[in-house]
Image (spheres, rainbow, N blue to C red):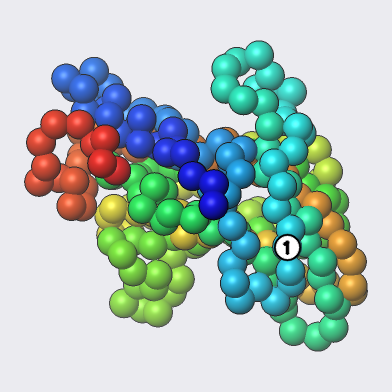
Amino acid sequence: MKTIKKTAVGILAAALCAGGAWAGEVTRTISDLNTPGEWVEYQWNGAKGRLAVRPEFPDELKGKGGEESSLGVKTVWPGGEGMKFCSIVPANPAQTEVPFKLLRISLWVKGAGSGHHGEIHFTANGQEKGADGKIYKVAFKGPITWNDWRKLEFEIPADWPQPVAVKSITLHSWGRPESVETTTYFTRLEATCDSDQKVGAQKAKSGSNDNW
Protein backbone atom coordinates (compact mmCIF):
# COMPACT_ATOMS: atom_id res chain seq x y z
CA MET A 1 0.00 0.00 0.00
CA LYS A 2 1.34 3.40 -0.94
CA THR A 3 2.01 5.82 1.87
CA ILE A 4 -0.25 8.84 1.64
CA LYS A 5 1.86 11.96 1.96
CA LYS A 6 0.90 14.66 4.42
CA THR A 7 -1.24 17.35 2.78
CA ALA A 8 -0.27 20.98 2.52
CA VAL A 9 -2.91 21.81 5.12
CA GLY A 10 -0.63 20.51 7.86
CA ILE A 11 2.07 22.89 6.71
CA LEU A 12 -0.53 25.64 6.78
CA ALA A 13 -1.24 25.09 10.46
CA ALA A 14 2.43 25.06 11.39
CA ALA A 15 3.03 28.30 9.49
CA LEU A 16 0.05 29.99 11.10
CA CYS A 17 1.31 29.13 14.55
CA ALA A 18 4.92 30.16 13.99
CA GLY A 19 5.36 33.24 16.13
CA GLY A 20 2.10 34.82 15.04
CA ALA A 21 3.57 35.50 11.59
CA TRP A 22 0.23 34.94 9.90
CA ALA A 23 -2.06 36.84 12.26
CA GLY A 24 -5.52 37.62 10.93
CA GLU A 25 -7.27 36.38 7.80
CA VAL A 26 -5.20 34.06 5.61
CA THR A 27 -5.77 31.61 2.76
CA ARG A 28 -3.90 28.35 2.52
CA THR A 29 -4.26 25.07 0.63
CA ILE A 30 -6.10 22.18 2.25
CA SER A 31 -5.37 19.80 -0.63
CA ASP A 32 -4.03 20.11 -4.17
CA LEU A 33 -5.98 16.96 -5.07
CA ASN A 34 -3.01 15.61 -7.01
CA THR A 35 -1.58 12.92 -4.74
CA PRO A 36 -2.57 9.34 -5.61
CA GLY A 37 -4.50 7.75 -2.75
CA GLU A 38 -5.10 10.98 -0.85
CA TRP A 39 -8.76 11.00 -1.98
CA VAL A 40 -10.82 7.87 -2.57
CA GLU A 41 -14.26 6.94 -3.87
CA TYR A 42 -17.02 6.84 -1.27
CA GLN A 43 -18.01 3.20 -0.79
CA TRP A 44 -21.78 3.78 -1.05
CA ASN A 45 -21.83 5.80 -4.26
CA GLY A 46 -24.92 5.27 -6.40
CA ALA A 47 -22.93 6.29 -9.47
CA LYS A 48 -19.53 4.66 -9.60
CA GLY A 49 -16.44 6.79 -10.04
CA ARG A 50 -12.86 6.13 -11.09
CA LEU A 51 -10.16 8.45 -9.78
CA ALA A 52 -6.84 9.32 -11.41
CA VAL A 53 -4.32 12.15 -11.13
CA ARG A 54 -4.25 13.91 -14.52
CA PRO A 55 -2.20 16.70 -16.15
CA GLU A 56 -5.24 18.98 -16.59
CA PHE A 57 -4.64 22.24 -14.71
CA PRO A 58 -6.01 25.81 -14.75
CA ASP A 59 -4.05 28.17 -17.01
CA GLU A 60 -4.44 30.89 -14.39
CA LEU A 61 -2.36 28.86 -11.90
CA LYS A 62 0.40 27.67 -14.21
CA GLY A 63 3.89 28.83 -13.33
CA LYS A 64 2.86 29.96 -9.84
CA GLY A 65 4.34 27.04 -7.90
CA GLY A 66 3.23 23.58 -6.93
CA GLU A 67 2.55 20.54 -9.05
CA GLU A 68 0.43 21.34 -12.10
CA SER A 69 -2.04 18.47 -12.05
CA SER A 70 -5.52 17.63 -10.80
CA LEU A 71 -7.76 14.79 -9.73
CA GLY A 72 -9.97 13.48 -12.52
CA VAL A 73 -13.20 11.78 -11.46
CA LYS A 74 -14.78 9.68 -14.21
CA THR A 75 -18.38 8.98 -13.23
CA VAL A 76 -20.66 6.41 -14.81
CA TRP A 77 -24.22 7.65 -14.26
CA PRO A 78 -26.59 4.68 -14.47
CA GLY A 79 -29.66 6.70 -15.40
CA GLY A 80 -33.21 6.04 -14.27
CA GLU A 81 -35.42 7.72 -11.73
CA GLY A 82 -34.09 8.87 -8.37
CA MET A 83 -31.05 10.97 -7.61
CA LYS A 84 -27.67 9.23 -7.83
CA PHE A 85 -24.49 10.65 -6.36
CA CYS A 86 -20.75 10.19 -6.71
CA SER A 87 -18.62 11.37 -3.79
CA ILE A 88 -14.91 11.44 -3.19
CA VAL A 89 -13.65 11.52 0.39
CA PRO A 90 -10.27 12.13 2.01
CA ALA A 91 -8.48 8.90 2.90
CA ASN A 92 -7.48 10.55 6.17
CA PRO A 93 -10.35 12.85 7.22
CA ALA A 94 -8.30 14.44 10.00
CA GLN A 95 -6.09 16.09 7.40
CA THR A 96 -8.93 18.24 6.06
CA GLU A 97 -9.86 19.74 9.43
CA VAL A 98 -9.04 23.43 9.73
CA PRO A 99 -7.83 24.21 13.26
CA PHE A 100 -8.74 27.90 12.97
CA LYS A 101 -12.11 29.55 12.40
CA LEU A 102 -13.04 28.77 8.79
CA LEU A 103 -14.50 31.73 6.92
CA ARG A 104 -14.52 30.68 3.27
CA ILE A 105 -13.55 27.75 1.10
CA SER A 106 -12.70 27.56 -2.60
CA LEU A 107 -12.17 24.83 -5.17
CA TRP A 108 -11.07 24.82 -8.80
CA VAL A 109 -13.37 22.69 -10.97
CA LYS A 110 -13.22 21.74 -14.63
CA GLY A 111 -16.72 20.62 -15.53
CA ALA A 112 -17.99 18.16 -18.11
CA GLY A 113 -20.80 20.42 -19.30
CA SER A 114 -23.32 17.70 -18.51
CA GLY A 115 -25.66 19.63 -16.24
CA HIS A 116 -24.98 17.56 -13.14
CA HIS A 117 -24.72 19.28 -9.77
CA GLY A 118 -21.96 19.56 -7.19
CA GLU A 119 -21.62 20.10 -3.46
CA ILE A 120 -18.95 20.14 -0.76
CA HIS A 121 -19.96 18.39 2.46
CA PHE A 122 -18.44 19.08 5.87
CA THR A 123 -18.36 18.04 9.47
CA ALA A 124 -18.73 20.88 11.96
CA ASN A 125 -17.31 20.13 15.39
CA GLY A 126 -17.41 16.47 14.39
CA GLN A 127 -21.08 16.46 13.33
CA GLU A 128 -22.52 15.99 9.82
CA LYS A 129 -25.83 17.73 10.66
CA GLY A 130 -26.96 20.57 12.85
CA ALA A 131 -29.62 20.41 15.57
CA ASP A 132 -32.18 21.35 12.90
CA GLY A 133 -31.29 18.25 10.90
CA LYS A 134 -29.71 20.20 8.04
CA ILE A 135 -26.55 18.78 6.50
CA TYR A 136 -23.44 20.95 6.67
CA LYS A 137 -22.78 21.57 2.98
CA VAL A 138 -22.37 24.23 0.32
CA ALA A 139 -23.73 23.74 -3.20
CA PHE A 140 -22.28 24.76 -6.53
CA LYS A 141 -24.30 27.65 -7.97
CA GLY A 142 -26.47 25.92 -10.53
CA PRO A 143 -25.74 22.87 -12.67
CA ILE A 144 -22.29 22.19 -14.10
CA THR A 145 -22.96 23.36 -17.65
CA TRP A 146 -19.39 24.53 -18.28
CA ASN A 147 -16.38 22.54 -19.49
CA ASP A 148 -13.58 24.95 -18.67
CA TRP A 149 -11.78 25.61 -15.37
CA ARG A 150 -13.57 27.77 -12.82
CA LYS A 151 -12.72 28.78 -9.28
CA LEU A 152 -15.75 28.28 -7.05
CA GLU A 153 -15.88 30.17 -3.76
CA PHE A 154 -18.20 29.63 -0.81
CA GLU A 155 -18.86 31.50 2.42
CA ILE A 156 -19.03 29.34 5.54
CA PRO A 157 -22.12 30.27 7.62
CA ALA A 158 -21.12 32.09 10.78
CA ASP A 159 -23.34 29.88 12.96
CA TRP A 160 -21.60 26.62 12.02
CA PRO A 161 -19.80 25.05 14.99
CA GLN A 162 -16.03 24.94 14.65
CA PRO A 163 -13.68 23.28 13.81
CA VAL A 164 -14.86 22.51 10.30
CA ALA A 165 -13.48 19.69 8.14
CA VAL A 166 -14.15 18.75 4.51
CA LYS A 167 -16.06 15.46 4.48
CA SER A 168 -16.57 14.99 0.74
CA ILE A 169 -16.76 16.54 -2.69
CA THR A 170 -20.01 15.28 -4.21
CA LEU A 171 -21.56 15.21 -7.68
CA HIS A 172 -25.21 14.26 -8.12
CA SER A 173 -27.74 13.68 -10.89
CA TRP A 174 -30.74 15.67 -9.67
CA GLY A 175 -32.93 16.30 -12.71
CA ARG A 176 -30.67 14.26 -15.02
CA PRO A 177 -32.21 10.76 -15.49
CA GLU A 178 -30.19 9.82 -18.58
CA SER A 179 -27.34 7.31 -18.58
CA VAL A 180 -24.05 9.04 -19.36
CA GLU A 181 -20.34 9.04 -18.51
CA THR A 182 -18.62 12.26 -17.39
CA THR A 183 -15.17 13.34 -16.23
CA THR A 184 -14.82 16.22 -13.78
CA TYR A 185 -11.48 17.58 -12.58
CA PHE A 186 -10.69 19.12 -9.18
CA THR A 187 -7.68 20.94 -7.79
CA ARG A 188 -6.62 23.51 -5.17
CA LEU A 189 -9.07 23.09 -2.33
CA GLU A 190 -8.28 26.15 -0.21
CA ALA A 191 -9.41 27.52 3.14
CA THR A 192 -9.60 31.14 4.21
CA CYS A 193 -9.55 31.28 7.99
CA ASP A 194 -9.04 33.62 10.91
CA SER A 195 -5.69 32.58 12.33
CA ASP A 196 -6.37 34.62 15.48
CA GLN A 197 -9.17 32.20 16.40
CA LYS A 198 -7.83 28.74 17.13
CA VAL A 199 -10.60 26.18 17.54
CA GLY A 200 -11.18 22.57 18.53
CA ALA A 201 -8.78 20.22 20.25
CA GLN A 202 -5.77 22.09 18.91
CA LYS A 203 -6.79 25.18 20.86
CA ALA A 204 -5.43 23.77 24.10
CA LYS A 205 -2.11 22.70 22.62
CA SER A 206 1.02 24.82 22.47
CA GLY A 207 3.62 24.97 19.74
CA SER A 208 3.09 24.07 16.11
CA ASN A 209 0.36 21.93 14.61
CA ASP A 210 2.70 19.39 13.04
CA ASN A 211 0.47 16.62 14.43
CA TRP A 212 -2.54 17.91 12.50
Q: Quadrant of residue 179?
A: bottom right
Give neighbour class at mark 1: few <14, some 14-19, many 20+ (Cα, 10 Å).
many
Quick check: 134 above or below 30?
below
Report the residue that reaches farthest toward the front: 1
> Quick check: can you spot residue 48?
yes
Which residue is painted at 10% across and 36% down in the image?
206
> Quick check: can you spot residue 24?
no
State left or right for residue 141 relative to residue 111: left
Residue type, mark 1 in image: Gly
Spot occupied by residue 69 in the image (x, y as percentages of width and height):
68, 32
Spot occupied by residue 198 in the image (x, y as percentages of width and height):
20, 41
State left or right for residue 171 relative to residue 91: right
Q: Quadrant of residue 153?
A: top right
Q: How many marks?
A: 1
Spot occupied by residue 138 in the image (x, y as percentages of width and height):
52, 58
Q: Secondary structure at mark 1?
A: strand
State left or right for residue 10 relative to residue 147: left
Q: Quadrant of residue 132?
A: bottom left
Quick check: 97 above or below 211?
below
Which residue is painted at 31% across and 64% down in the image?
126
Which one is nearer the viewer's eye here, 5 or 43?
5
Quick check: 204 above or below 91?
above
Q: Which residue is mark 1?
A: 49
Which residue is painted at 29% across and 43% down in the image?
212
